[in-house]
Image: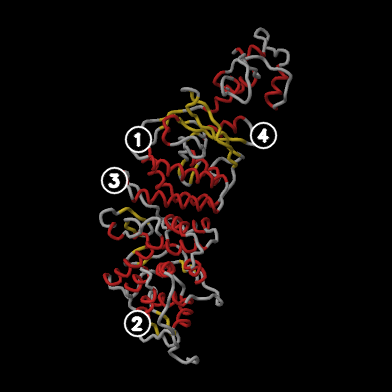
Amino acid sequence: MQRIVSLFDTLTGKPKKNTDILLKSSLFNIPIASLPKVVIGQFSPFLAGGPNGTIGFTSKDITSCNPWDYILMLEGAITFSSAVTKRIGSEEIGRMSSPFTVSFSVAGFGSASYFEVDKFRAEQWMPIWEKPTKFKELYTLFSEGRANVGRKNAQYGVDFARAVATLGVDRGISSFIRYGYLERNGRAYLAIPFGRFTVERKIEVALLDDLDIWIDRLRKTVRDKKIPNRFKRELKRIEDTILEICRGSTTSKWQELIISLGEAEYLFSKSKKISKDKNLLPISNLSPKWLKQVNDGSIEFRLASALASIRDERVGSLRRHMIPIKEDKGRAWFDFDKGLPNVVWHKGALIDSMINVLKIRMHLVKKENLEYLPINGKIKVSIEDINCFIDKNVDDEKIERLLWGLNGINWDKAYEEDYESDELTEIFPPYGMIKLVHYHDKLPINEKKKLYVNVPVDPSIILKAKAGDFNTAIKRAYKRLIGVNLYPKFQEGCVSADISRRIAASILFPISKEDIKRLIKLILKPIYDEED
């Protein structure tokens, strides 16, 4: 009322001197020579002054403010009317609902963490529009406060960012400024701006819908004060990356996200009691379209995706040797009771772990009475990439970190993709000899004559190569081929112990049929004349 009295004569109702000038200044941000000294308090903490209230030195005197700013602020606040809401059929306590308001997410706020979540009330996304609009239209906009992620309403700040990036908000809004209500300056709650988000459609952000159920369970888990802090750190890391993707989608950010998901899954697999009690799940059923976003064109990505795509109808995927799970139609659940005996992967030891997978798969050949070694995959690796792997021209750590996340792809829905080799690519003969004995199918010796040969696996070959005794491994592979009437052009080989181990591990990578034909031509003596 003081602000109205300062602008209008209470007896005549007419505006006082400079009232029109002050109005133009408020509406159009026109600078004026001086403003009245007023007290605005919590409605504008910046103008209230005080220690750390603004940049530079401030006076302790009452600050200046345009009375129209105060009046229009209160008038505009009416559009932010709140109500108590409660989900139908839910036993949860009702809570306040306000336009464009969601539960607070610590994502995007460096100094905040889930350790102090009790100090955060909520966050509100303030819309900005660039075209003139009528108050009736504006009132309708704020009364709805629509922000949808897929088929559901946005519940958290990260969800709202996804809604902005997928046009799940009302039309006509050009951007949003994100505000969080945080306990600061003692026990006072202040509105802190967290940045501006432009409303711009990013089609790929819709892929994040695949994570909704998984990430909601993790959010519920971290609310428990007894949960270790490492779970809270993983959630913040994931939500930070999602927020960055919503700001600007890049391959590096998608890779960071898929790696973070893999790290979280590994954490779940090592926390049996928490995962059981909170019903946490492995990452699963991610659309194969994720591959396009994560693919940076690197050798490491191709090798990791090839490993992740390995699966067999009878013995399952490679992933079951990394964490205790059971799988069905692209979905996965932890199986800590029956799944642990199959786990042979040791995080941080890529070469040894790959060899361990080969060993257990060779054991399953005999146990399940399989005709061939179950190491086929949807993604086939080229000989060039395998050469780089053997020669240590790749980042082993990156391969493994990508592998953990790429395991969550629904590979049953993925298309076959062969990274075939160039005809001029040099083939490392020792690798070729070992691979012929460990192919995922019968060897196509002569397709015209329909001659296909199945070479029985010999676990001792990989074990000798792992131990660095590569010459013995070559000799045993030679004997295996001779035993099925295939005659290699050499029967000895000598490499360093380190290279020997990497050759053993490289056998796990699936290769295309065309490349196995090249290996047959290089390694084996011809059985038929060229005209055959």
**Which of the 4 image quadrants contains residue 503?**
bottom left
Q: Which residue is disc 2 drawn over?
A: 479
**Disc 2 vs disc 3: which is toward the camera?**
2
Between the residue at mark 1 and the residue at mark 4, the CA separation in whole angstroms equals 48 Å
Q: Which residue is disc 3 drawn over?
A: 273
Between the residue at mark 4 and the residue at mark 3, the CA separation in whole angstroms equals 57 Å
Q: Which residue is disc 1 drawn over?
A: 225
Q: Is 38 located above or below residue 424 in the figure? A: above
Of the residues under marks 1 and 4, which one precedes in the sequence?
Answer: 4
Label 4 secondary element: loop
Of the residues under marks 2 and 3, which one precedes in the sequence?
Answer: 3
**Disc 2 vs disc 1: which is toward the camera?**
2
Label 1 secondary element: loop
Query: What amino acid is found at the position of numbered circle 3 in the picture?
Result: Lys
**Disc 4 vs disc 3: which is toward the camera?**
3
Residue 443 screen position, x and y as percent? 40, 80
Residue placed at 73% from the left, 13% from the top?
A: 17
Between the residue at mark 1 and the residue at mark 3, the CA separation in whole angstroms equals 15 Å
